[in-house]
Amino acid sequence: MAELNNNDLIIDRLLWEQKQLDAKDFIIHADKQTDTSWDNQVSISSSRVMDIRYRIYFLIALVLFVVLGLYVVLPGWDVFQSTQASLQSINLKVDNFATKKLKMDADKALIAKMASQESLIVSCLNQRVGCQDIDQSIRNNFSFARSYIQLNNLSDPKMLINEKVLLANINWYLLQDSDGSSNGNITQIVIGEPKQFMDNLRYVPLKLTISFQNKDSLLSFLDNVEKKILPDPEYRVLYKIDKVSYDIANYTTQQSVGIDLNAYYYTD
């Protein structure tokens, strides 16, 4: 009986120790599960923190990019574009200046030739004599040569324009036929206010009413205005006709004709 009791005690002891070991294993396993869950929570929290941080960094970088674009890149681009436009304008002006200089040099050479051959030009235009002796460059620019020679200074210190020269030119030149006779009789003349044409070049509008015997007398007047040159340089005037009121159906009868023209001149 004593031996059985001892065996029961041994069995009970072993069972109790086994229970203690199982309890320790359970506690260790539970502790491990608790540690793993905490690690996972820590890892998830860290990921969220890093994600928020990256978003903040991205927003800051985006704001800096926008500010850089608005206050640095765009103004710099505008300055660059403005500089390029200015350079193009300067280059265009330089090119135009070079072109104008060449034209001015050519005009100066042409004017010098016209001054030296003025008598030939006048005789060629008025009597059709000596035309072949005129320099080819002038013959190619006869209209310019005539305008240049006819242009005069009509300014007057006492009046807006020297009317004496104008009236003398009309009476002694425009109203004279090729044979020296009168081609018409002026009945009215109105001299307008001088106006600026370009730089020191000005013009004064004139309204004339002239009685012509027939169309040939009118054509003689127009020929003097548009094609011939007054021999006396002091009384030369450059005219451009604006309007002629003439009844072409009655070209054989005497008519009172209205003529609007501009007298061009330069000032010092």
Image (tube, rainbow, N blue to C red):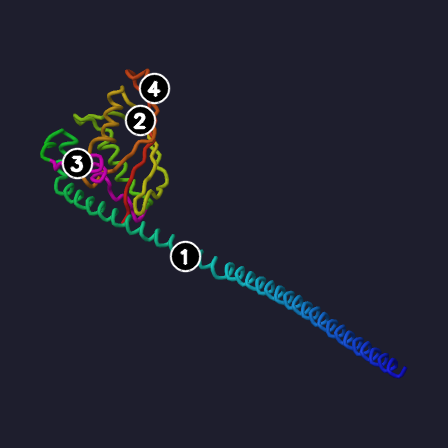
Residue 19 falls within the magenta-colored stretch: no
Nearer to us: label 4 or label 2: 4
Q: Which residue is mark 4?
A: 247
Closer to us: mark 2 or mark 1? 1
User: Given the image, on which type of amino acid does mark 2 rest?
Assistant: Ile
Q: Which mark is residue 80?
A: 1
Disc 2, SS: strand
Where is residue 48? Give x, y as percent. 65, 65
Q: Residues within 10 Å of mark 1 (few under 14, many from 20)?
A: few
Q: Looking at the picture, which amino acid does disc 3 mark? A: Pro
The span shown in magenta is 134-158
Query: CB of mark 3 within 8 Å of CB of mark 2?
Result: no
Give the residue number, with chain letter if any, for mark 2. Answer: 210
Name the residue that disc number 3 marks: 231
Q: Secondary structure at mark 3?
A: loop
Q: Quadrant of residue 141?
A: top left
